[in-house]
Image (cartoon, rainbow, N blue to C red):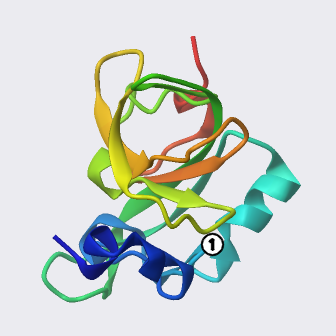
Amino acid sequence: MTLTSILPTLRLSIPDPFAIGRWPEWTVPTITDVVVSGVSLRRLVEVCGSPCVHVAAAVVPGTHGRPSDLAQSSVVVATVLAVTGGRLELDADVERVPAVLSEARLIGRASACRTRDLTLPGGAVLALPADLAVGDLVAVPCPGALARRDVLPA
């Protein structure tokens, strides 16, 4: 339990905490974006479209963010296509890759709503703000180097 989960309005002034070892090197969350190795994921979507994938060095476990010399890590950014009841549809199939769904984050805007569990078409569950809407962007970290084709829906 974090302060931003107890008092969601805090998300308007501070970003949700994140597990540094689950994201690529030099990941910095803000209230409306995630910057990975100097690349804004919001800007990446503006340039490349959605879904998109950003790859950088992974973090060495237990080092509080030291980049790995060998391993890579990715972040998938997807657009919300539909939210109906407790079901969520994205323009990327994050269930086909080893996504760390517990680290999924809303980017593009700040939300003061509590999180709720949403179920993807394949049954995986992730927690995102209750006011999630069509067109919102969701960033999800994944271990390993992914290509865009890895997350395109079949």
Which residue is drawn at the image coordinates 81% and 44% (left, top)?
49
The image shows residue 51 at horizontal and vertical percentages of 67, 39
Judge from the rendering whether residue 13 lies leftward or rightward of residue 94; answer left or right: right
Q: Nearer the viewer, residue 146 or 38?
A: 38
Coordinates of residue 94 in the picture (x, y in percent): 44, 33
Taking the image as shown, residue 124 lies to the left or right of residue 154, namely left
Q: Nearer the viewer, residue 128 or 54?
A: 128
Q: Amino acid at mark 1?
A: Thr
* Residue denoted by label 1: 32
Q: Tell me what residue is drawn at x 42 percent, y 49 percent.
A: 128
- Asked whether residue 53 appears in the rendered view, the answer is yes
Q: Quadrant where the N terminus lies?
A: bottom left
Place residue 24 in its image quadrant.
bottom left
Is 133 situated left or right of 46 in this image?
left
Looking at the rendered image, the quarter that the C terminus falls into is top right
**Rendered location of residue 21, percent (x, y):** 26, 73
